[in-house]
Image (cartoon, rainbow, N blue to C red):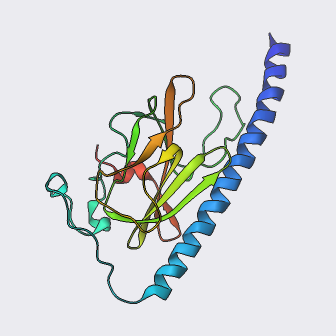
Amino acid sequence: YSKRLAANQNRYKKELESKRKEVDKLNREVERLLAQAIKQQEQKSTDKEDYPVFAASTAQLTADFASNKGKLPWPVDNGVVIEKFGQHYHPLFKGVKLPFNNGINISTSAGKSVKSVFHGVISRVVIIPGYNQCVLVEHGNYFTFYCKLADVSVKVGDRVNTGDIIGTLTISNNTSTLHFELWNKTVKQDPELWLAR
């Protein structure tokens, strides 16, 4: 049994190293995209961005992103958080650190639609290895990032309202997982603290 566990641990460490490289690439790419978007924001003007008027269904949210902490709708209709924000250890192999998660991973039904959690402007649409298509939405000083999309129904510059569909998730083993991040400029936030309970 202990030989099998050791062999499994070695195999798992290799898989973990590969996942760590994927996560590192994702993290570097997100930071690069945010830096670009913020630079673009600063160059554009000092004017306040005009955001679209709320649809009636989103009237309970205030116009300012920051004052909606704990009230934002979930980016998928139903799902469960399978990987939380931050640093975690492997459940079986004590002392084996998993890569730092800059967001949360939400498991949901296969091919579910992904929706914008707040009104804003599509800032970037990119492909990141291991994460498929990803969409960065700008909400003033805040940004939301949606990954693992099979297809995207928005393009850079599009304005979206709260609840607008931005794409559908990739299907793997009859399920889908959304990787979702939330940033205040370059400061990562725990998305669970922002989403409605």
Which quadrant: the N terminus? top right
Q: Is 115 above or below relative to 122?
A: above
Residue 140 as seen in the image, left or right of residue 156 = left
Q: Residue at x 39, y 90 (%)?
A: 46
Q: Residue at x 48, y 85 (%)?
A: 42
Q: Nearer the viewer, residue 157 or 72?
A: 157
Residue lying farthest to the bottom in this orientation: 46
Q: Residue at x 29, y 53 (%)?
A: 72
Q: Nearer the viewer, residue 104 or 125?
A: 125
Which quadrant: the C terminus? top left
Instruction: Quadrant for residue 173, please give it.
Output: top right
Count of labels in the image: 0
Instruction: Quadrant for residue 113, please give it.
Output: top left
Q: Is 3 above or below relative to 47?
A: above
Residue 141: give x, y in percent of width and height.
41, 73
Residue 121: give x, y in percent of width and height.
39, 67
Instruction: Quadrant for residue 90, please give it.
Output: top right
Q: Nearer the viewer, residue 60 or 95?
A: 60
Q: Residue at x 64, y 52 (%)?
A: 128
Q: Is residue 169 visible?
A: yes
Q: Is residue 84 visible?
A: no
Residue 184: give x, y in percent of width and height.
45, 68
Residue 162: give x, y in percent of width and height.
28, 56
